[in-house]
Image (spheres, rainbow, N blue to C red):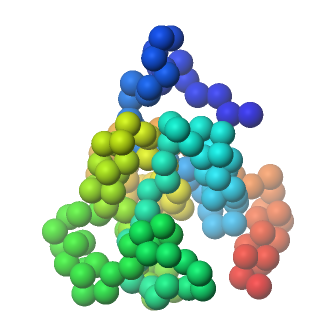
Amino acid sequence: MFVFAKEYFHPFNPTPLKYKPLIIVGPSGVGKNTLKGAILKKYGGLFEAKISYTTRNVKGIEKKKEAYYFISREEFTKRVEKGEFVEWCEINGELYGTTYVELDRIKSKGKIPIIEVDVKGAVKINERAIEGNFLFVYPPSFEELRRQIGRAHV
């Protein structure tokens, strides 16, 4: 069960009063996406997941503008140089990032953006003085985290 602070709601108007992103932080394999999915399922009218930009190719049945905005490495680099990203990183030779425009798109709909990042991504967001509500997700044990990471890479 998820419970959110009272300051997000007015008793006569369930519209959120604050649009600070919910930033779910944790290591790979800890369950950030599972938690995000549960929040969206229960509170979909209040939250929306951000769509990341990436330089990697479309996989399987992914659809553009649903899973990712797919752009070239050159375009991504230009956007980095212009300071368009709240956070970005390189994983396995591909670039991934979240833009300020994407967060504004969600806020303009009256929703709270959800961002899921590792600890390095959270540090970048914090360095850019983005006001957010950080939720750190940690594994029950290092053994369980190793097991989950191993399963994710099979």
For the image, the number of numbered tags is 0
In the image, is 18 to the left or to the right of 151? left
- The residue lying at 38 percent from left, 37 percent from top is 110
- Most distant residue in the left direction: 82
For the N terminus, the image quarter is top right
- The residue closer to the viewer here, 55 or 143, is 55
Instruction: Residue at 64% x, 53% y: name it.
Output: 37
Q: Nearer the viewer, residue 81 or 75?
A: 75
Q: Residue at x 42, y 40 (%)?
A: 111
Give the residue drawn at x 39%, y 24%. Answer: 17
Estimate the x, y position of residue 11 in percent, counting from the top left: 50, 11
Residue 4 location in percent, x, y?
58, 28
Q: Which of 88 and 127 lies nearest the eye of the viewer?
A: 88
Q: Is residue 81 visible?
A: yes
Q: Quadrant of the C terminus?
A: bottom right
Residue ranking furthest to the top: 12
Camera-side residue of 119 and 38: 38
Looking at the image, residue 79 lies above or below residue 34: below
- Residue 148 placement (x, y as % from top left): 78, 69
